[in-house]
Image: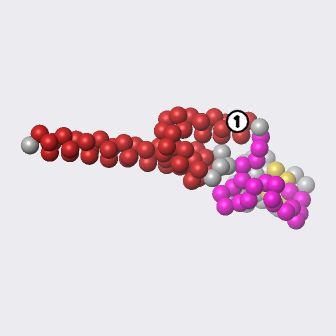
Amino acid sequence: MADTAGSSLSLFIWVLIIGVGVLYGFWGGHIARNCGLDYWIGFIVGLLGGLIGILVLWLVGRDRIKKNKPVPERGQPEAGHIRQRQALKVCDRCGKLVESGATFCQYCGAVFTSAAS
């Protein structure tokens, strides 16, 4: 009887450890995606590294943002691989890049007073 209770407690502890690891993985993936890194790399770092992995991802993301390296939108290539077909300008309201001839921002809806804004 005591062996059954011990094995069920052991199973519960292992399930808890794996569950917490997966939650750290999701958290790490979220942090990685927000700083422009691959989601799955962040997931693996969070899963295997736990709190230390989360801390490392947070520090890498903070340093990446400090260097003002542009973070690509989800599904967009890195900034160095984008072929510019037309001139771009920065929206004063949200800070995103829009076409220079646009009359409004496609991201936040801000109306531009002139095309050269």
Q: Given the image, on which type of amino acid does mark 1 rest?
A: Asp
Rendered view: 65 above or below 113: above
Q: Which is nearer the eye, 13 or 108?
A: 13
Q: Is residue 85 left or right of residue 79?
A: right
Q: Residue 56's x, y, as percent?
A: 59, 36
Q: Residue at left 55%, top 44%?
A: 45
Q: Quadrant of residue 14?
A: top left
Mark 1, secondary structure of its residue: helix
Q: Residue 6's x, y, as percent?
A: 18, 40
Q: What are the residue bounds of the magenta stretch?
A: 68-88
Q: Residue furthest front?
A: 3
Q: Which is nearer the eye, 51 or 99?
A: 51
The answer to whether residue 20 of the structure is visible from this angle is yes
Q: Residue at left 38%, top 47%?
A: 19
Q: Residue furthest left?
A: 1
Q: Which is nearer the eye, 106 or 76?
A: 76
Q: Residue 3's x, y, as percent?
A: 14, 42
Q: Residue at left 20%, top 44%?
A: 7
Q: Residue at left 77%, top 44%?
A: 69
Residue that badge 1 annotates: 63
Q: Is residue 6 left or right of residue 13?
A: left
Q: Quadrant of residue 65?
A: top right
Principal secondary structure, stretch drawn in magenta? loop
